[in-house]
């Protein structure tokens, strides 16, 4: 079932890309202690902790506000064992412990589409959940609902879980990748799936941060340049055009100045620049790129509007929405809002960034996603505690029940403090 969902979403993206190959304006409602750490993209799946939000130090979606806890917790959809709790099919609407055997603590987590990753304090990586394409990195294509070791990895600094592939940034500044590779998302120069980690090729310098999206990936180099590879149906590689070809060799993204942080949504990408501004590119049917319209695709990096007077620290994206952590510890959000995932107290799509209500002292952010660009969920760590808002169809908010919320709600975990969060496909991870 999970694989079919993935394929349907990827096919839908291809169809959307074909329909909007010529820019089209979609009608949309008009929108009216110093924190530390990162976000999704950086360090966890779609950032920080992942699908992520990169930058902030790495990652797929999620965010990391610092180092380790002795365990992780998971909640939400569990159709493929993605919660890592030893069972399949029993969704959890409240945080449930993910146990990793051994003496080493969990430093950060990253959530993908049906699977999860955890970085341990000894520099090794654990993985669990769906494994149809080898995204667990154990040399098999056998799924498992409990954490197991990713083969051959050590000295890992940051992890990122993409749609159905995984990335690891090593302490020496090189990258490893594994999983689905049909669009070149592993950047090993081929389109062959890999069930064991391989080295990412073609990056002309030391990598400092990573971000993984649905079928594309980003790397931030020490000199502030950003490289992208993988799928480009929606212009998510930032090359000035969109196409359906694989791109297994990293390509430089054209940015006006050096980047300090990166983040990935499902089919759009983001970069924070040295002056605290943000550039976005890729799928924009809900205004998730942030340039004030819904012309899609946006194959060139464009400035996110409405951020005058603030500086952004890190970013992360879902399917149709984007989150930004400001240097003052507050948050902005924009894009789709059908489930309240922007946290502004409404369910109105926003083309201009709005304030996420009721949050201060935020140290990490993460955006989750599901099968609709109008839906999604969001996470934040504030003063060491987890907050969540948006879609709750599968319990991914972790607050009990299945009622969605357009305002941030406290999540009760056994993690004190929580230092890493990540949002995947309708589930969440924290450590």
Image (tube, rainbow, N blue to C red):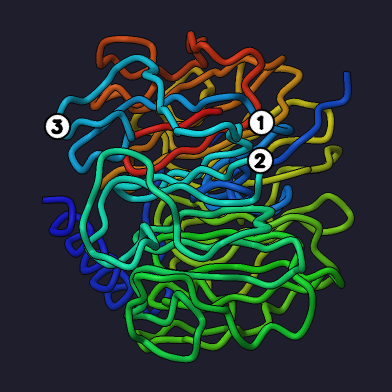
Look at discs 2 and 1 and give the one toward the viewer: 2
Q: Residue at x 41, y 71 (%)?
A: 196
Q: Position of residue 327 (x, y in %)?
A: 83, 35
Q: Residue furthest front?
A: 102
Is residue 290 visible to the viewer in this orientation of the structure?
no
Q: Position of residue 374 (x, y in %)?
A: 33, 42
**Label 3 close to label 1 by CB (< 8 Å):** no
Q: Residue at x 39, y 86 (%)?
A: 246
- In the image: residue 317, left or right of residue 377: right
Look at discs 3 and 1 and give the one toward the viewer: 1
Give the Cα distance between marks 3 and 1.
Answer: 28 Å
Q: Which mark is residue 340?
A: none
Seen in the picture, residue 251 relative to 278 is either above or below; the reply is below
Give the Cα distance between marks 2 and 1.
Answer: 7 Å
Q: Considering only order in the chain, which callout, 1 or 3, is on the residue closer to the N terminus?
A: 1
Q: Secondary structure at mark 2?
A: loop
Look at discs 3 and 2 and give the one toward the viewer: 2
Q: Residue at x 84, y 49 (%)?
A: 276
**Label 2 close to label 1 by CB (< 8 Å):** yes
- Characterize the local packing of mark 1: few (<14), some (14-19) or many (20 or more) Cα atoms within 10 angstroms: many
Residue highlighted by disc 1 = 68
- In the image: residue 46, left or right of residue 120: left
Q: Considering only order in the chain, which callout, 2 or 3, is on the residue closer to the N terminus?
A: 3
- In the image: residue 158, left or right of residue 233: right
Give the Cα distance between marks 3 and 2.
Answer: 30 Å
Residue highlighted by disc 3 = 89
Q: Residue at x 42, y 56 (%)?
A: 266
Residue highlighted by disc 2 = 121
Q: Secondary structure at mark 3?
A: loop
Seen in the picture, residue 191 relative to 40 is either above or below; the reply is below
- Characterize the local packing of mark 2: few (<14), some (14-19) or many (20 or more) Cα atoms within 10 angstroms: many
């Amino acid at each position: 079932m999970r694989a079919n969902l993935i394929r349907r979403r990827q096919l839908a993206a291809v169809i959307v890309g074909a329909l909007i190959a010529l820019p089209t304006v979609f009608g949309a409602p008009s929108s009216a202690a110093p924190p530390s750490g990162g976000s999704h993209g950086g360090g966890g799946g779609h950032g920080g902790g992942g699908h992520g939000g990169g930058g902030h130090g790495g990652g797929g979606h999620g965010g990391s506000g610092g180092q380790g806890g002795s365990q992780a917790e998971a909640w939400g959809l569990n159709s493929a064992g993605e919660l890592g709790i030893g069972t399949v099919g029993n969704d959890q609407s409240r945080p449930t412990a993910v146990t990793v055997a051994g003496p080493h603590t969990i430093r950060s987590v990253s959530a993908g589409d049906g699977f999860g990753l955890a970085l341990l304090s000894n520099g090794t990586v654990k993985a669990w959940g769906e494994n149809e394409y080898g995204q667990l990195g154990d040399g098999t294509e056998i799924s498992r609902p409990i954490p197991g070791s990713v083969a051959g990895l050590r000295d890992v600094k940051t992890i990122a879980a993409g749609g159905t592939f995984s990335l690891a940034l090593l302490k020496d500044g090189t990258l490893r990748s594994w999983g689905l590779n049909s669009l070149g998302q592993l950047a090993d120069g081929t389109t062959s799936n890999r069930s064991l980690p391989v080295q990412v090729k073609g990056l002309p310098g030391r990598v400092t941060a990573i971000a993984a999206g649905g079928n594309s990936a980003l790397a931030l180099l020490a000199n502030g340049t950003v490289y992208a590879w993988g799928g480009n149906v929606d212009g998510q590689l930032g090359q000035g055009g969109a196409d359906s070809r694989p791109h297994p060799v990293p390509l430089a993204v054209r940015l006006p100045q050096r980047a300090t942080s990166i983040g990935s949504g499902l089919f759009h990408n983001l970069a924070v620049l040295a002056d605290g501004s943000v550039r976005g590119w890729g799928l924009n049917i809900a205004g998730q790129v942030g340039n004030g319209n819904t012309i899609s695709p946006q194959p060139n990096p464009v400035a996110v509007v409405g951020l005058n007077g603030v500086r952004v620290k890190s970013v992360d994206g879902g399917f149709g929405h984007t989150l930004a952590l400001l240097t003052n510890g507050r948050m902005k959000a924009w894009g789709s809002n059908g489930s309240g995932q922007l946290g502004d107290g409404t369910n109105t799509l926003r083309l201009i960034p709005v304030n996420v209500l009721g949050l201060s002292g935020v140290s990490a952010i993460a955006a989750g996603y599901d099968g609709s660009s109008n839906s999604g969920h969001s996470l934040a760590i504030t003063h060491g505690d987890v907050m969540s808002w948006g879609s709750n169809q599968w319990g991914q908010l972790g607050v009990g029940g299945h009622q969605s919320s357009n305002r941030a709600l406290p999540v009760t975990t056994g993690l004190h403090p929580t230092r890493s969060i990540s949002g995947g496909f309708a589930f969440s991870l924290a450590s």
